[in-house]
Every structure is written in structure tokens, then in C-alpha cells.
Image: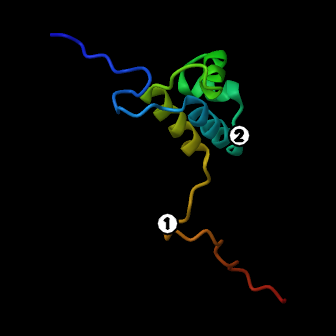
Amino acid sequence: MEVMKLCTHCNGTGVALDYVQIGTSLRDKRKAAGITLREMARSVGCSHSFLSQLENGKRAWRRSVSKRYELAIAATAPAKPANGSSRQAPCSKNHPF
């Protein structure tokens, strides 16, 4: 059985991927989540230098790495209330004001 290799420029989609744009977007998400490059590298399972190359568009993103990257960001996001509201529940104490 022959193993089919995906194009490194389009990952088999036929559309060229902009790795700089992808890396910049994911780096911005990582920073917004307050995760350092080294922390993200540990979560993703790669070296911080490799992750830096990905974020700067110097290496091609693989689906497995980008999925682990997104999962690590999602894991740091604050949990939303079950009803989807971001408002806090009112205090149950009877304040005099």
C-alpha cells in the first residue's frame, strides 16, 4: 500500500496556505490567553524554538500541532456559565445598600 503525501504548500486543499498569517493569528491568541511560548511548547509537545518557527511562518503548520495548540488555548479560557450568560449571579446576602 502506497502512502499518500500531502502537498506542503496547501496540505492537500489546493489553496496555498499563508503560514505567516496562521502563525501570527495563533501567537496573538496565545498571548491573549497569557501563555508563554515555553508553556505552550510543553502543552503542545514540542520545543519552544520549533514553536517559535511555526508562529513566525518559517515552518509549515501540521494539523496535529495546530489542534493541540488550539486545545491548550481553550483549556486556559475561563469557563462560561451553563446558560451562556457572562454576567455574574447576584449576591445572595442581604446588603443594607
Mark 2 crowdedness (10 Å alpha carbons): few <14, some 14-19, many ≥20: few
- Estimate the x, y position of residue 71 in percent, counting from the top left: 51, 39
Alpha carbon distance from label 2 to label 1: 26 Å
In the displayed structure, 46 sits above or below 79; it is above
**Residue drawn where x is 61% and y is 20% of the image:** 58
Mark 1 surroundings within 10 Å by alpha-carbon count, few (fewer than 14), some (14 through 19), many (20 or more): few
Give whichever of 61, 45 is nearer the camera: 61
Q: Vertically, is 71 above or below 86?
A: above
| Residue 4 x %, y % | 25, 16
Q: Where is mark 1, residue-wise?
A: 82
Q: Quadrant of the N terminus?
A: top left
Q: Along the line of sight, which residue is nearer the eye, 6 or 45?
A: 6
38 or 1: nearer the viewer? 1
Q: Residue furthest front?
A: 15
Residue that carries the numbered disc 2 in the rendered image: 31
Q: Position of residue 54 (x, y in %)?
A: 59, 24
Which one is in front, 8 or 45?
8
Task: Name the element at disc 2.
Answer: helix
| Outermost residue, left side | 1
Q: Nearer the viewer, mark 2 or mark 1?
A: 2
**Sequence-earlier tag: 2 or 1:** 2
Image quarter where the C terminus lies is bottom right
Question: SS class of the residue under badge 1?
Answer: loop
Three-letter code for the amino acid on which mark 1 is drawn: Ala
Which amino acid type is shown beneath numbered disc 2? Lys
State yes or no: discs 2 and 1 in contact (Cβ < 8 Å): no
Judge from the rendering whether residue 67 lies leftward or rightward of residue 43; answer left or right.
Answer: left
Q: Quadrant of residue 42?
A: top right
